[in-house]
Image: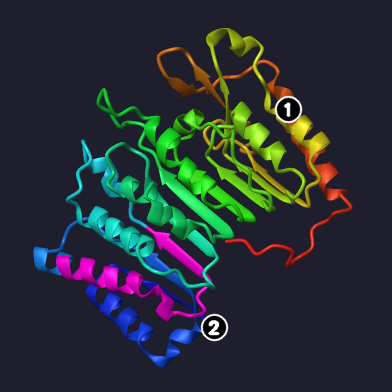
Amino acid sequence: MSSITCEPRLQSLVNTRLLQEGPNAILVDELIFDSTDLEDTGYDEDSVEQIESLCAQVFENLTCFPYVKTLRLRFHYEFHRQLQPLVGTSTELRVQYTVLQALANNPRPDTLVNLEITGINTAPGDVCHKVFVSKAFQEFLLPTRALSLSFDSDPNFQSSDDEEPASFWSDIFPTFLFYTPIISSLELKCNDAANTSFINWQGYNIPYLNNLAFHGFMYVDTLERFVLQHKANLAYLTIDDCSILINNFEQIYKPRYWANVFRLLEQETELAELNVSPSIARSAGIYAGDGSVTYIEKMGYYIDFGDGIQLHSGRIQGEEDDMPALASFKRRVQLNPRGYQPGMLSRL
């Protein structure tokens, strides 16, 4: 079996269509659609229309790959930062919309169980949001067993009065969890933890969840309850560059520490594998006079001062217990008789 990569370029799309119609289509078990290296310039209208048409044809005919197991959609997202307000006329946005619509409105291969989407824009006004909440796309999601999503959240986006920053997380994001009830693996990434504090993680039931990974998310109370709700089958947990939100100024002196999180998870879970990475922004190297460097690792903390959420770069009294508590948690996982066995889990 083989993996193929398709780009939104004319020749690449034509080659993919020829492969779909040929005898070697049965050999493809992974399809990667990758537009991450493309600039949103350089296309005249004729080529844009051809690209849209060919993208539609490729994903309308996904069943031509009868044994495809994994689909990776890697969208280019930097253009979002250049559009204020967002408009639906850019080449990349049109390509994204075309691909997602084609997937939603056409048969999904029975073998397709792994889905990755990167470059999901969270700012209000993105036309792709209409696809995500459509019944057709929700039905497309249902057979998914391993889901990996990466969100691009622009902290400098200025929303209008009727487009609150929280709207994506409250109105669009739930689609991905409500309509993937049989997933065993869930990986979520975001480049701006502050905006993920709007997520309410209550109300989801994913009984087969075995692998859970968060990158750049706010570890709020409802997320902790979400993790514990699925502890029966949970074997793999990743917490990478995540943060805790301190809700008001007074709590700086008595916050909810990461140490509390690690101790609770140590008591309540039976993990086979644990991966925790500290805050990239808060960790730093301290240089000594002899040229040596001591790297100080710290977990992430954000503070809500009432007029906005900000990463707390200074010291928080009591956080010195965080890393020892993490070390204890890791030792507990290493001693877990459940143990890590290579091949136990197929992850995206």
Compare residues 331 and 17 and report the one nearer the observer.
17
From the image, which quarter does the C terminus lie in? bottom right
Residue farthest toward the left in the current orientation of the protein:
45
Whether residue 31 sits left or right of residue 344 in the image: it is: left
The answer to whether one can see residue 309 in this image is yes
Residue 251, placed above or below residue 346: above
Q: Residue at x 59, y 28 (%)?
A: 220
| C-alpha gap between disc 1 and disc 2 | 46 Å
Whether residue 192 sits left or right of residue 19 in the image: it is: right
Residue at mark 2: 1
x and y percent of residue 181 in the render?
59, 51
Q: Amino acid at mark 2?
A: Met
Dot label at residue 259? 1
Residue 13, placed above or below residue 325: below
Compare residues 328 and 111 and report the one nearer the observer.
111
Q: Residue at x 39, y 37 (%)?
A: 168
Q: Is residue 65 magenta?
A: yes
Residue 148, placed above or below residue 32: above
Q: Amino acid at mark 1?
A: Ala
x and y percent of residue 183 in the render?
60, 55
Secondary structure of the residue carrying tag 2 is: loop
**Magenta residues?**
49-74
Residue farthest toward the bottom in the current orientation of the protein:
23
x and y percent of residue 136 in the render?
39, 56
Secondary structure of the residue carrying tag 1 is: helix
